[in-house]
Image (cartoon, rainbow, N blue to C red):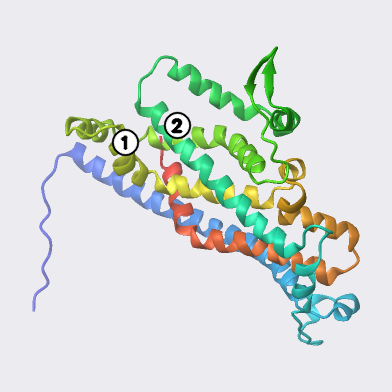
Amino acid sequence: MTATVPAKIPVDKKTEKQLARGEKLGAATRTKKRLTSRGATIAALVIAVLWTTPTFGLFISSIRPPEEILRNGWWTIFQNPGFTLNNYTEVLAAGNSTLNLAGAFINSIAITLPATIFPLVIASLAAYAFAWIKFPGRNWMFIGVFALQIVPLQMALVPLLSLFSRGLSIGDVELFASLNASNAYSQVWIAHTIFALPLAIFLLHNFVSEIPSELIEAARVDGAGHGQIFFRIVLPLTMPAIASFAIFQFLWVWNDLLVALVFADGRVAPMTKLLAEITGSRGQDWNLLTAGAFISILVPLIVFFALQRYFVRGLLAGSTKG
């Protein structure tokens, strides 16, 4: 059986140099990629260990009896085994005179879901308008939206609270009526939506504007209107970016305490506010604090792992632009 030797195609010297340069470049690229991947892998492992270890310790402490928590550390769980779920039962019933932590957990979900969906819907429509609809002052309006990102959130809290409670009037003309919703979710929904819109519009606009113009023009030639183009072409193509921002917005609203202290009082207070109160009133009860803290991170973990593939796609799409 004879071996088959591939025939050498005759090329000129210029092409031969280009081929050699390409081989060297390919080898260098592969080497660089391999080294970069190794470092990135080590960094990812270190970050994972640094993040997972205290989280695991928090979980172990939350299911240990109070006397064991005070007597020794969580890392001695195998030498001093002892588990209980009473910590979770007790902390869910803890709180103030109007609300317990179980009710605050429901409030956090009721606040976070609309406060994530509202800015995404408005920002995706605004991003499409800024990218593909021509109207007078479009560029100046987009610059104005971009500039709003530098306004500190703390500067807007008091004026916004005054607007919600008193409304806005010039002379005898009432421009905006007061909401009179001190114990309702609407205040905190509107506040989170307003604070999220500048960054959401800016990020989604970058993705929407990168869609090939030939695709949009072909849809217009076929008779598609703006609604059909947005829902059938733009929205599916930008779904990774929308999912990525949805994760960020969900985590921001879920973990927020500052906006909740100003706009969410009484029966609509979220879990972060109740946990702060429990920390002040029962700060010595480590069994309750660890159980409450683990409950607070449970939902963000579920959301992140459920949308992880979209999150990675969104980051990769952003990294390959330009």
Q: Identify the image quadrant of residue 48.
A: bottom right
Question: Residue 15: where, in percent of width, then height?
Answer: 19, 40
Q: Which residue is mark 1?
A: 227
Q: Residue 307 or 75: which is nearer the viewer?
A: 307
**Position of 67 relative to 236 (above/below):** below
Return the mark for residue 126: 2
Question: N-terminal of the two: label 1 or label 2?
Answer: 2
Q: Give the number of callouts.
A: 2
**Residue 24 horizontal side relative to residue 160, left or right:** left
Q: Amino acid at mark 2?
A: Ala
Figure quadrant of the N terminus: bottom left
Residue plotted at (64% across, 48% down) = 253
Secondary element under disc 1, as helix, strand or loop, is helix
How many residues crowd mark 1 within 10 Å: few (<14), some (14–19), many (20+)?
few
Crowd class of label 2 (few under 14; some 14 to 19; many from 20; radius 10 Å): some
Residue 164 pos. (x, y %)? 69, 32
* Residue 117 on image: x %, y %: 51, 46
Question: Amino acid under label 1?
Answer: Gly
